[in-house]
């Protein structure tokens, strides 16, 4: 990935995180924006997030973020000077869940060795 795309992704992540924090949707759980991957043509951006809670909370949070995507895109258009304002799609970042499972497996192995 080029340095330019890294900067674009970083700026978008900050703007999106600020806007998601300001959302008043009651379906929204405790969300952390973990990353953004913007297409090279700047027309689409995948926003990765993590959410604390049960699968029901995760599902309602996904619905809330999908509903807020046009609003967040408008905010990006107003705050970030880009050739195109990307269409956003929100995706759960499963890296945190996988890391937790790996940590738990390592603890089990460690406990079994003792």
Image (cartoon, grey):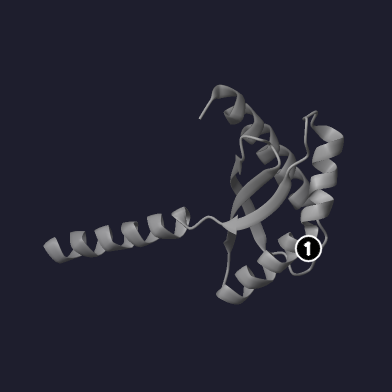
Q: In this view, does 110 lie above or below 72?
A: below
Q: Position of residue 7 (x, y in %)?
A: 62, 27
Q: Is residue 91 visible?
A: yes
Residue furthest top as drawn: 3
Q: Is residue 114 visible?
A: no
Q: The C terminus lies in which quarter of the figure?
A: bottom left
**Mark 1 crowdedness (10 Å alpha carbons): few <14, some 14-19, many ≥20:** few
Q: In this view, does 74 lie to the left or right of 1?
A: right
Element marked by disc 1: helix
Residue at the image point whose x is 46% and y is 55% from the top: 96
Q: Quadrant of residue 9?
A: top right
Q: Where is residue 40 in the image (x, y as percent from the top left)?
A: 61, 35
Residue at the image point whose x is 60% and y is 29% from the top: 5
Where is mark 1, residue-wise?
67
Residue at the image point whose x is 58% and y is 69% from the top: 53
Residue at the image point whose x is 66% and y is 35% from the top: 41
Q: In this view, does 99 lie above or below 40?
A: below
Q: Is residue 97 above or below residue 82?
A: below
Q: Where is residue 105 in the image (x, y as percent from the top left)?
A: 28, 62
Q: Is residue 16 left or right of residue 100?
A: right
């Amino acid at each position: 990935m080029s340095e330019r795309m890294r900067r674009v992704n970083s700026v978008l992540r900050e703007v999106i995180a600020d806007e998601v924090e300001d959302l008043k949707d009651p379906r929204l759980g405790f969300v952390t924006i973990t990353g953004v991957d913007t297409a090279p043509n700047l027309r689409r951006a995948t926003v990765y997030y993590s959410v604390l809670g049960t699968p029901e909370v995760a599902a309602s949070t996904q619905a809330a973020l999908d509903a807020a995507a046009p609003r967040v895109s408008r905010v990006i258009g107003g705050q970030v000077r880009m050739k195109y304002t990307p269409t956003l799609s929100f995706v759960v970042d499963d890296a945190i869940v996988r890391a937790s499972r790996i940590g738990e497996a390592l603890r089990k192995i460690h406990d079994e060795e003792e």
